[in-house]
Image (spheres, rainbow, N blue to C red):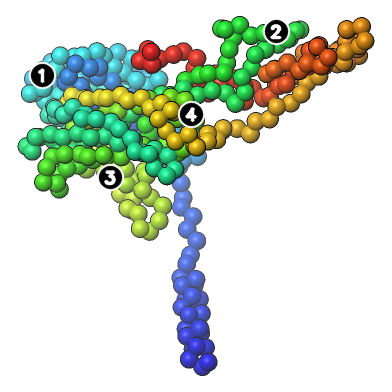
Amino acid sequence: MKKGLKIFLVLIAVLASWLACKKPYSPKLVGNNTHYMVVEGIINTGNDSTIFKLTKTVAVSARLDSTAVLGAGVIIEGKSGDAHLLSELGNGRYGAGPLGLDSTKLYRVHILTVEGVEYASDYVQSRTTPPIDSVGYNVTGNGIQIYVNTHNSPEQARYYRWDYRETWQFHAKYGSGYVSDGVSILPRTTEQMIFSCFGNHYSNVITLGSSAKLAQNVIYQAPVIAIPSTSEKIETRYSILVKQYALTPEAYSYWQSMKNNTEQIGSIFDPQPSEVSGNIHCLTNPALPVLGYVSAGTIQQKRIFIDQTKLPQTWQTIYPYDCQLDSNLFCRPTAGGGCLPEVQQNLVPLPNSHIPVAAIYKGGFVVGYTASDEKCVDCTLRGTKQVPDFWR
């Protein structure tokens, strides 16, 4: 007993000492100008468009993640003297079709903002990206894991980055067969149907792969994205377009640091924050930080489709909202086939926050409609009815 008591007292002393060493940390948020330039894009030396996105960071307390840089002049410059102006596409995006660049030469991006601040990247060598061998998926216990396969010759690129665009067909919780015009409730026309829509999402994570430590220059089943079995993305039909970029070791190091700083911080075992330095500089004020890393090269891409019929039929989609059907009665039939006027006057039309779903019949007469909230009936609040060209 005495030995056990001693051990207990030692543990209490250690715990007390540890608690005494803990001090609350309340970091002071930077209050000065933190609107730093963020440059995203790749100089495409292949037969595809070159697109850059320019944004500026905002204060931690701001509601937006970033603000678009508008009205800037963006030029792709070759070290041999050629220059190619990108057109403003809106929302901070600047681009042009195939520029016919020489992949053996060095290029950089040169930016001039409306405030007269000038930025430029280092001149970079073009990298040839190998084709994507395949994009596939594995069915796991709780969803699907999408992956990418590629390979290259031993002396070529061994560092890769991928991004993607998802498109999926989904439907509202309830299908509405009727619409209210404010006076009457009428059957919907084909053009008024709001049950089936398409959703889209661009990747917002950094996905990297490397074969530098492998005997062969092969990337096998590199994870791209995991989709839960309950996601409405895979309730009907899903498609993903994966883009592949070959990187230099320096570019890979930059993106790996960015990934560590933005996605893998949360415990003492995760990588600690570090300063990330890209290859873009402010020429007007060299001390001003700039975020981004400009690469040049070709881009490879591949699209796949996944039909719900190819997935386990036991999977159940969880709808993103709590949806219920309400009964909206406006007519109590009389013996002569009419409606009691006091009931009809009080409940027609349906409340604006509800959309009629189906008719309620009693004694051969329509006495009201079931209805639900807009978010549960109108799929266009979260998507578009426009069928993508590649979907057909």
* Front position among marks 4 and 1: 4
Q: Is residue 85 visible?
A: no
Give me the residue at 65% from left, 14% from top: 177
Q: Secondary structure at mark 2?
A: strand
The quadrant of the rendering that contains the C terminus is top left
Residue linked to disc 3? 257
The reply, left or right, for residue 9 in relation to residue 294 is: right
The reply, left or right, for residue 318 in relation to residue 287 is: right
Give me the residue at 65% from left, 30% from top: 323
Q: Secondary structure at mark 1?
A: loop
Residue linked to disc 4? 235
Q: Amino acid at mark 1?
A: Asp
Give the Cα distance between marks 4 and 1: 45 Å
Give the Cα distance between marks 3 and 4: 36 Å
* Front position among marks 2 and 3: 2
State which quadrant residue 30 falls in.
top left
The reply, left or right, for residue 134 in relation to residue 214 is: right
Q: Amino acid at mark 3?
A: Ser
Residue linked to disc 1? 102
Q: Secondary structure at mark 4?
A: loop
Contact flag, marks 1 and 3 (Cβ < 8 Å):
no
The reply, left or right, for residue 327 in relation to residue 334 is: left
Q: Amino acid at mark 4?
A: Glu
Q: Where does residue 76 sit, x and y in percent of width and height?
A: 20, 20
Mark with earlier residue (4, 2) = 2
Residue linked to disc 2? 186
Mark with earlier residue (4, 1) = 1
Give the Cα distance between marks 4 and 2: 30 Å
